[in-house]
Image: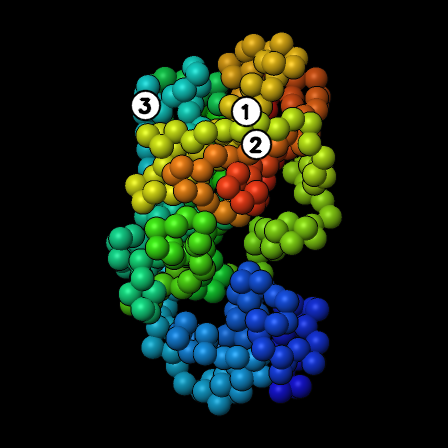
Amino acid sequence: MKKYLQILQNVFPIIRETDLDIPIKDIGIDSLDLVVIRVGIEKYFGKETSDAEWYQFKTLTEALKYFETNSPKISQNTVAAKQITSKRKYEIRMPQMAVNALSENWLLKEMGDLHWDLLSQGLEQKSSEFKDENGNRLYATFVRISFLISPLHGFLENDTLTLKSEIKRFGNNTYFTTVIGNSNENMLEANLMTSFTQRQQNDNSKILKSDPKEKLNVIEQIKYIPEFFNQYRLLKKNLLEELQFNHISFSLANEIISTDDYRINPYYEINGVGLLYFASYPIISDKCTADYLRKIHKVNDFESSYSTIYRDIFYFLNCNIGDHVNFNLHTIEDFEENKLIVTTSLYRVSDKTLMAKIFTIKQKTA
């Protein structure tokens, strides 16, 4: 199988020849790395394989031998890809607003709903029907969301907001939705990424990645490793050297300016299946940042005087309904006089494990 080593190194350069016969679990690669390797092999041989087949391979040599032998066969799930898109229009009313502005919480949930709807269209299943090959319920779990938006205070009551979205995939587990929004002179550009996961015995601290059993999948495949995905992999491994947006560089340092203990409000921040809402993570961060500014710098109007114009949220873990969240403020700095750059993280108090890193730009309102 040495002749196929270059295939693996093209997508995962640190793989060595000696790794081919070592048990996959002992090579030192995580589940995201394995997604990249699996997709690279499937694309080279022109064949997709089921979870049941893939997870029976103990070594990469076994996987390569299987594909070499079976690549002439056509996967039963191979179908012509389609462009899966959606367009929605809203009149901005009080349910879509918060603090005299467009509600970021509502916007995130609505974009999440768009993503799940596109997934359902592409897999031709209702979201409640997403299951793995063993019949376990699966959830499309957000792992990264970033968006650039006009100041939220610029979106006014009774304005019309239009959201256009499109979904693509990288392998069978990782899905990407782009959202373009317009409302008068205001704009939105967003990228959302999910992977399928399975809850373990209703314990949100034990969530495992898995792939849906496909009846059909017409969502278009991305040919190369998306940079959006690759940055997530590297940040999770603490290997990302820098994170930039336009000409702004976010600090990746772990120094802590302030820390706080946040108790989850289950009536508002827990979703329908008992998970901490993905939309709650940045709102928790903002609440604790506002508390810090109020206590330390006597800024009493942060919530109403600063508006989100950029977010990049990296999600790593969820938590249980009774958990507390530890908030850490890493950096908060002025930029161009009327903007703040804020870097924060959230940890699960029960086991001190990183839940998310959040990179934010706020603009002072007139």
Residue 18 placement (x, y as % from top left): 70, 81
- Residue 327 is labelled as 2
Q: Nearer the viewer, mark 2 or mark 3?
A: 2
Mark 3 crowdedness (10 Å alpha carbons): few <14, some 14-19, many ≥20 = few
- Which of marks 3 and 1 precedes in the sequence? 3
Q: For marks 2 and 1, give the CA distance.
A: 7 Å
The residue under the point 33% across, 69% down is 133
Secondary structure type for disc 1: helix
Q: Which residue is mark 3?
A: 95
Q: Horizontal placement of 71 versus 216: left or right?
A: right
Residue 115 placement (x, y as % from top left): 38, 47
Secondary structure type for disc 3: helix
Residue 97 placement (x, y as % from top left): 38, 21
- Which of marks 1 and 2 precedes in the sequence? 1
- Residue 249 is labelled as none
Q: Which residue is mark 1?
A: 288
Q: Do residues under tags 2 and 1 come within 8 Å of each other at their CB atoms?
A: yes
Three-letter amino acid code at the position of disc 3: Pro
The residue under the point 54% across, 84% down is 62
Asked whether residue 166 appears in the rendered view, the answer is no
Q: Do residues under tags 2 and 3 come within 8 Å of each other at their CB atoms?
A: no
Residue 195 placement (x, y as % from top left): 45, 55
Q: For marks 1 and 3, give the CA distance.
A: 23 Å
Image: 324 above or below 40: above
